[in-house]
Structures are given as C-alpha cells and as structure tokens.
C-alpha cells in the first residue's frame, strides 16, 4: 500500500500535525512530506505514504510556486509575522519601477542565509534550538534558484509577489532580503504555496475531507520521460536488487534515474542506467525467497 496525496494545508497547524491526520485517515504510520510548510503558511503539502516515502528524493518536485505578502518598513526576529518586531521605520512610497528593480535583483541563482528560526541543522542540531537558547551559531549559506519573480500587487506598505523557485528556498529570507534591497526592512506577512512540481493547489484536498479518491498515482510525481517499463523476465531480478540489461527496457533512461514499471504497469521502484545495465536504486516490492513482498 503506497501512494501520494496532495494536501491543502491550512494556516495554523504544523506540517507534522497535518501528516498525523493523514496517518489516521490511512491507518498507516509511514508517511512523509515533500517539503515542510511553517504554521503561518498554507497551500500544497505533498504527502507520500508507505514505501512511496522512499521515492521522495527522486520525484520531479524541485520547482515550487508561492504567493507571498511582504510587509515593508518592519523587521522581525523570525523574518515573518510570528516573530518579535526588531525595527519599524518610515519609508517612501516606492514607485512600481523601484519595486520591480529590487525584485529583479533576486532573479536567477542567488545565495541565501536561512533564518535562525528554521529547521536547518548545524552540527546535528536545528537552528531554532540555538535561537531559543540565545546561542550564536554560524549559519551556512545556500545556493537557490529563483526562476520567476513577479509583482502582483503594491499597497504601499505591503507587496504581493509570485515566486517560482527551487527547493530549499526560504521565502522568509527572500522577504527580508527584499526589504534590505529597498532599504526599509521587511518581513513575510503571509504565504501560500500554490504548486509543488506538477501538483497544483486547485487539485489539493482539505485534510479534514479526505476520501479514498484523494489518493493519486505515484507516477504523477515523475515527468513522462522518466518512466520506463521492463520485461516480465526482468521483474524478479529487479525486485531482487540485481542488474538487468538496459536493452530490455522500453526506452533509454536519459535522466540520472527513472521510475520503473512492470510489464503490467505496476510501479516497481527507481532504476539508474549505468553503461549497459539498469541498477535498482529503490525496490518497492522486494523478492524474498519465493515471493514478492
């Protein structure tokens, strides 16, 4: 039993609390999400369950889209509405060109420093634990990509922007950095994640209203060119973790890895093509003894 559910997370609960509700609905303990959302944030929370949790690192879900409201003229200890105000300043009424010029500074590959109040680990401990104890720690920078950044509304002291970015991007940090670029300070006032890979908020389900039909096929998380079928004679070798000839698959694996299907269209796992063979990277239905688990 495995699959994925596109959950519409509400503002308030943590991602972990939402997953606990999914566990109760499914009657299964093994659940994981493909990218956390802070309690302040809402929107798409992609939840995998059962053996599908092992597929999360291989899914085509690197691109994520957000709608963010950014408060100008204020800074916060957490870079968002939930933190303590650390400064409040008066600022001019920015023209649309000034705002657009500031936003374009964050287009493309950029360097970010995650917020001190975040789950990023340093020396095996989450940053927020250092922050709560008032301990200083060197926060490692990270490279992220902003594919698109668009101004949707300008209310003078509050901006609404749309951001299409890579996984690992902190929108709280982006909001703070936009405030620095405008020389007035800023923090994230609200956030909605509208897309994770091919999963859209318009198709997301409220966690309180889950039904069996809320579960979607795992293959939706993979691009069509990352799906291959193997022959019947190769199914047991693959499920046993053995190499199979690359000439026996339906199409070459052009990416580093691909989702592997049986000839009867069952998902078997993840395979990687190296030279003339397919190497099983993840096996969902291991062959043990004389049976498939």
Image (cartoon, helix red, strand yellow):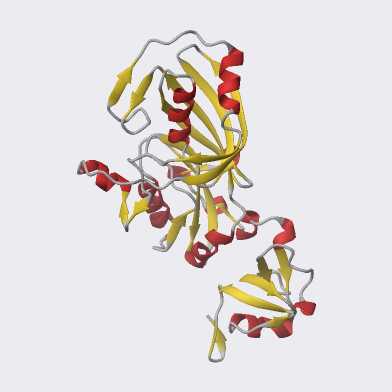
Residue 264: which quarter of the image? bottom right
Q: Position of residue 278 (x, y in %)?
A: 69, 77
Residue found at the far left of this picture: 133
The residue shown at (40%, 46%) is 15
Residue 233: which quarter of the image? bottom right
Q: Nearer the viewer, residue 121 or 152?
A: 121
Q: Nearer the viewer, residue 173 or 53?
A: 173
The residue shown at (46%, 29%) is 177
Q: Position of residue 290 (x, y in %)?
A: 56, 91
Q: Position of residue 67 (x, y in %)?
A: 53, 30
Up the image or down, 142 lies above or below 171; here it is: below
Q: Is residue 267 visible?
A: no
Up the image or down, 118 lies above or below 215; here it is: above
Q: Position of residue 161 (x, y in %)?
A: 55, 26
In the rendered structure, the answer to whether residue 31 lies left or right of residue 241 reads left
Q: Is residue 218 visible?
A: yes
Residue found at the far bottom of this picture: 289
Residue 73: which quarter of the image? top left
The residue shown at (50%, 42%) is 169
Count the marks: 0
Up the image or down, 219 lies above or below 252; here it is: above
Residue found at the far front of this picture: 138
The residue shown at (73%, 57%) is 224
């Amino acid at each position: 039993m495995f699959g994925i559910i596109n959950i519409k997370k509400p503002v308030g609960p943590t991602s972990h609390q939402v997953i606990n509700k999914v566990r109760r609905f499914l009657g299964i303990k093994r659940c994981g999400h493909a990218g956390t959302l802070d309690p302040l944030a809402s929107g798409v929370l992609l939840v995998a369950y059962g053996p599908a949790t092992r597929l999360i690192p291989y899914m085509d879900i690197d691109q994520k889209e957000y709608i963010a409201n950014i408060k100008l003229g204020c800074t916060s200890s957490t870079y968002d509405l939930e933190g303590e105000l650390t400064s409040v300043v008066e600022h001019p009424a920015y023209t649309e060109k000034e705002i657009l010029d500031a936003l374009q500074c964050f287009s493309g590959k950029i360097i970010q420093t995650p917020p001190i109040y975040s789950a990023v680990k340093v020396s095996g401990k989450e940053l927020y634990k250092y922050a709560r104890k008032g301990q200083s720690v060197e926060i490692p920078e990270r490279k992220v990509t902003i594919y698109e950044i668009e101004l949707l509304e300008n209310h003078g002291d509050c901006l609404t922007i749309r951001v299409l970015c890579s996984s690992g991007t902190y929108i709280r940090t982006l909001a703070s950095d936009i405030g620095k670029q405008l020389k007035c300070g800023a923090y994230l006032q609200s956030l909605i994640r509208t897309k994770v890979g091919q999963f859209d908020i318009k198709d997301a389900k409220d966690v309180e209203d889950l039904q069996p039909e809320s579960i979607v096929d795992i293959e939706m998380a993979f691009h069509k060119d990352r799906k291959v079928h193997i022959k019947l004679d190769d199914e047991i070798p693959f499920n046993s973790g053995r190499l199979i000839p690359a000439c026996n698959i339906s199409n070459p694996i052009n990416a580093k890895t691909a989702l592997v299907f049986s000839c009867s269209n069952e998902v078997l796992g993840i395979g990687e093509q190296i030279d003339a063979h397919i190497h099983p990277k993840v096996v969902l239905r291991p062959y043990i003894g004389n049976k498939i688990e």
